[in-house]
């Protein structure tokens, strides 16, 4: 599935929620589906700076694709990571580098996620792009 299709699927999922509280809960539940993150990977060098909460990101190259796992001490952050991963995980590195983070505005989460969390998403995407280089 193309990145734009992934974004549209997530947008539709969130639009189907009757209110902001349900959207928030849906995002949190998405984070529950993240792959397990080993405690041994909770290293300072794997922390994503610029996030309000602790967020660890580990990535490895599988051929030309970038595979990532992550976790956070905040449930909403794990949900936001799950959204980013649905869009970018296991994609070719060039596709990740070319990703325009402004497309995330289509999801409409800026109304339910604090500006600090939105900045954290930006930091996460910048880190992913760096790892894709």
Image (cartoon, grey):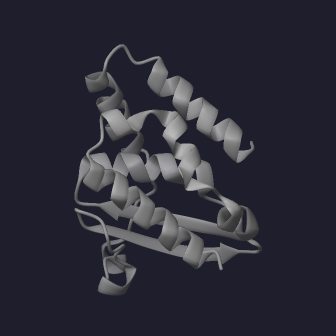
Q: How many marks?
A: 0
85 or 34: nearer the viewer = 85
Q: Is residue 46 left or right of residue 74?
A: right
The quarter of the rendered structure image containing the N terminus is top right
The quarter of the rendered structure image containing the C terminus is bottom right
* In the depicted structure, whether residue 39 falls above or below residue 107: below
Residue visible at 74% across and 44% down?
A: 2
Residue 120 visible in the displayed image:
yes
Res. 62 image quadrant: bottom right
Q: Is residue 123 left or right of residue 49?
A: right
Residue visible at 57% across and 77% down?
A: 131
41 or 76: nearer the viewer = 76
Residue 31 point in image, percent of width and height: 38, 46
Residue 11 point in image, percent of width and height: 53, 30
Residue 29 visible in the displayed image:
no
Residue visible at 23% across and 62% down?
A: 52
Residue 104 point in image, percent of width and height: 52, 44
* In the depicted structure, whether residue 100 falls above or below residue 20: below
Q: Extreme top residue here?
A: 18
Res. 66 image quadrant: bottom right
Residue 79 point in image, percent of width and height: 37, 46
* In the depicted structure, whether residue 96 falls above or below residue 13: below
Residue visible at 32% across and 39% down?
A: 28
């Amino acid at each position: 599935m193309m990145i734009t299709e992934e974004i549209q699927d997530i947008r539709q999922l969130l639009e189907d929620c009757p209110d902001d509280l349900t959207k928030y809960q849906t995002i949190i539940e998405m984070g529950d589906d993240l792959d397990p993150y080993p405690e041994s990977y909770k290293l300072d060098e794997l922390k994503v700076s610029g996030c309000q909460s602790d967020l660890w990101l580990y990535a490895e190259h599988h051929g030309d694709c970038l595979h990532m796992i992550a976790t956070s001490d905040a449930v909403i952050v794990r949900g936001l990571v799950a959204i980013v991963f649905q869009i970018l995980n296991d994609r070719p590195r060039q596709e990740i580098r070319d990703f325009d983070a402004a497309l995330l505005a289509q999801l409409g989460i800026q109304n339910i996620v604090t500006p600090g969390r939105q900045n954290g998403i930006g930091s996460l995407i910048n880190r992913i792009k760096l790892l894709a280089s």
